[in-house]
Amino acid sequence: MKLVYFSWVKDRIGMAEEDIELPENVKTVADLLAWMPGRGANFADALADPAIIRVAVDQEYAQGDRDVRGASEIALFPPVTGG
């Protein structure tokens, strides 16, 4: 699956996207956000406050209980504001 990062999440992680195979125990968005900081200091920095990270699974906003297994793309980004 492809993980895509936007805005300061991308800057802190140090890449715009990557292809990855998730571990068996990562089944939901919440699982993903809990697992990713263990991948390295850059991920831990970007995801230090997972409550503010927004996630889209296959281009649809997703909550923590959304199943990520079988997804083609998961995007992580900071809160979006409009005006």
Image (spheres, helix red, strand yellow):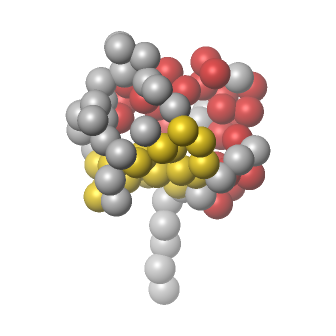
Q: Say whether residue 52 is left or right of residue 30.
A: right
Q: Nearest the camera: 13 or 2? A: 2
Left or right of 11 in this view: 18: left
Query: On the rendered structure, is 53 left or right of 67?
Result: right
Most extreme residue toward the top is 25
Q: Which residue is drawn at 31% across and 41% down?
A: 71
Q: Can residue 21 be seen in this snapshot?
A: yes
Residue furthest to the bottom in view is 83
**Percent of width and height locating residue 58:** 32, 53
* 30 vs 82, nearest the viewer: 30
Residue 39 position by quadrant: top right
Image coordinates of residue 2 in percent, x first then y, are 48, 44
Mark yes or no: residue 76 visible: no
Q: Residue at point 65% right, 52% down?
A: 16
What's the residue at 42%, 46% (across, down)? 74
The image quadrant where one finds the N terminus is top left
Above or below 53: residue 82: below
Residue 8 falls left or right of residue 27: right
Residue at image x 36%, y 45%? 72
Image position, residue 45 (x, y; %)? 70, 34
